[in-house]
Structures are given as C-alpha cells and as structure tokens.
Image (tube, rainbow, N blue to C red):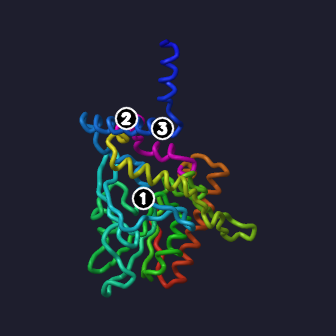
C-alpha cells in the first residue's frame, strides 16, 4: 500500500524547471544576504582597493579611456585614503569652463596618475597648488596614460581650452613601456608606430571595447563600493604588498626602459620605447606650438 502512495505523493510535488531555478536563485540571494550581514557584524568595512581606480575612468574610442565627469568618492589602498572629485569636464578638482578666468596665464597639465593626483586629496595635487592669482591651471591628467595618450588628450580635449602653456609630465617609471602597450583586456588603447617614411602612425582607432565587459566592470565597482562581503573576500584574496625597494636598485628593477636610461644594458624593446617616446615628445611640442602655446616637458 505504502509502496503505491509514496510515489504518487512525490509525483504531485515534483517541481518544474522554472521552480527549481527560482529556488536556487532564492538560495543564492539568501546566502549572500546572510554573508553580507555577517561581514558587517564582524567588522569588515569598505577598503579602497586599487581596483577602484576604474571607478573614475570610462572607455573612450580615441584615447582608450578617459576621466569620468561629475563623479566623486573615496580612493586609495592600505597606505592612504583620499577623496576624489571630478568636475563636469572630467578634470580633477574645482569646476572649470572654456572661458578664461580674468587675465591669468592659462596652464594645461598633461600626464598620468602623477598629474591626476594618485595618493593625494583634491587640494594637494600639484596642479591645484600651482593655481594662483597669476596662473589658471587645468589638470588634464588621467590615470594610466602614457606620452601617446597625453598627446591625444591635448588634441582631443585640452587644445579647445586655448592654454598659454602646456606642461607634460612624463613618468620614467612606466611611461616608456606604456608607449608600446596596446592596453589591457579591460581598457585597450591605441598605439603609435613609426612608419617607413619616419613619421608617426596611429593604429587601433577607433578603440574597440567590449560592452559586456564594461557592464560587468560597472557592476563590480558598484558592488565593491557598497558590499562589506565583497570587500572581505577582496581583503582575503589580496596578496600582501612587497617590501618597497629604495634607491638606485629600485630604478634598475622597475623595467628595461629604466635600465637603459641608466646605461646598465640595452635591448630592442628598450630602444624602441625610447625612440617612440622621443618622437611623441617632439610631435607634442610641434602640435602645442602650432596652437600658439608654449610646451614644457617635466621628467619625473
């Protein structure tokens, strides 16, 4: 008797595929919710990992990526925590306009995270500190830029502000390598080559970005800024930072371009990096002068 009743009862309660998928999703949601609550109760809080730098950038078809406009938020890592504000024009710091502010000399500063202000507050960037009654300083720095993207930044964006002086800050620690790079899977970028005639040729424009990957990155960075549970996982998975190397040895060990600068060795990629960087600087200087401004190069 029981042998016939039990199979019949199980047949009545058999779940269809949609119900099974719904229960699995519900279980995941409940599990994540309990995990989030537990992470908050045990004291895991927001840690501004370096991955959050993508929060302040977005894909660009010409430059590879650019600053996001009108966003703000915490930024940092284990050593520091700062608050970053991007104005409506995608520049770090105070609001700016195309119109000049009085009779001050207008200075446009191009560069990477050194210019953008990695590790310092809005009022501590050297662009902000140089701004005065005499100089109106515009910060066009973007994290991760090389000399090639700085050149494109001037042509695409900065030249429209008609600066009197254009300052390019070139960071020797990685800009030489960046000028040969085509970017990453997350943010690909164009690259300049030297053509047979000896001129510069830009390849990879328009830059192709994955819409699906960009959406996934947006979801990830939103979750990382709001989820204590995700930050707890990130803290567990993040390897400890290596002990920093100081002095001359740090310059030598940071890559082939730096070894070439200090004449310790030479190879083809290093020679190519130096050659393309020199050509980019020359082209930028010509482009800046053609727009009526004075170029200045600062090597960091």
Image spot of residue 289 (x, y percent): 52, 81
Image depth: mark 3 or mark 2 in front: 3
- Rendered position, 212 above or below 205: above
Residue lying at the far front of the rendered structure: 1
Disc assigned to residue 113: 1
- Rendered position, 139 above or below 144: below
The answer to whether residue 297 is visible is yes
- Rendered position, 265 above or below 17: below
Disc assigned to residue 19: 3
Question: Does dot 2 land on a helix, a strand or a loop?
Answer: helix
Q: Is residue 236 left or right of residue 195?
A: left
Residue visible at 63% across and 66% down?
Answer: 205
- Rendered position, 209 above or below 280: above
Image spot of residue 101 (x, y percent): 32, 84
Q: Quadrant of residue 94?
A: bottom left
Q: Quadrant of residue 180?
A: bottom right
Alpha-carbon span between mark 1 and mark 3:
50 Å
Q: Count the marks.
A: 3
Residue visible at 47% across and 79% down?
Answer: 294
- Assess disc 2: are there few (<14), some (14-19) or many (≥20) residues with their C-alpha within 10 Å of its C-alpha: few
Most foreground residue, 222 or 21: 21
Image spot of residue 12 (x, y percent): 49, 29
Image depth: mark 2 or mark 1 in front: 2
Range of residues picked out in magenta: 232-258
Residue lying at the far bottom of the rendered structure: 103
Alpha-carbon span between mark 2 and mark 1:
39 Å
- Assess disc 1: are there few (<14), some (14-19) or many (≥20) residues with their C-alpha within 10 Å of its C-alpha: some
Most foreground residue, 69 or 38: 38
What residue is shown with label 2?
A: 31
- Assess disc 3: are there few (<14), some (14-19) or many (≥20) residues with their C-alpha within 10 Å of its C-alpha: few
């Amino acid at each position: 008797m029981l042998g016939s009743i039990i199979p019949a009862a199980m047949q009545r309660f058999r779940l269809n595929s949609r119900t099974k998928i719904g229960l699995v999703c519900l279980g995941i949601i409940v599990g994540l919710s309990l995990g989030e609550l537990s992470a908050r109760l045990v004291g895991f809080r927001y840690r501004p990992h370096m991955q959050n730098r993508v929060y302040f950038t977005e894909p660009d078809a010409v430059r590879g990526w650019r600053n996001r406009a009108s966003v703000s938020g915490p930024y940092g890592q284990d050593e520091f925590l700062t608050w970053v504000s991007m104005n409506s024009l995608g520049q770090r710091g105070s609001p700016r306009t195309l119109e000049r502010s009085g009779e001050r000399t207008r200075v446009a500063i191009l560069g990477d995270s050194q210019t953008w202000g990695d590790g310092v507050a809005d009022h501590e960037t050297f662009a902000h500190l140089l701004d005065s009654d005499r100089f109106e300083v515009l910060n066009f720095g973007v994290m991760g830029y090389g000399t090639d993207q700085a050149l494109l930044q001037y042509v695409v964006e900065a030249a429209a502000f008609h600066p009197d002086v254009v300052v390019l800050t070139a960071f020797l620690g990685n800009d030489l390598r960046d000028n040969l790079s085509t970017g990453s899977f997350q943010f690909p970028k164009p690259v300049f080559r030297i053509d047979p005639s000896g001129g510069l040729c830009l390849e990879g424009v328009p830059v192709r970005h994955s819409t699906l990957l960009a959406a996934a990155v947006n979801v990830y960075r939103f979750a990382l800024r709001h989820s204590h549970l995700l930050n707890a996982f990130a803290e567990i998975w993040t390897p400890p930072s290596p002990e920093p190397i100081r002095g001359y040895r740090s310059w030598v060990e940071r890559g082939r371009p730096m070894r070439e600068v200090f004449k310790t060795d030479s190879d083809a990629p290093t020679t190519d990096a130096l050659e393309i960087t020199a050509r980019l600087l020359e082209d930028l200087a010509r482009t800046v002068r053609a727009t009526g401004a004075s170029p200045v190069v600062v090597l960091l």
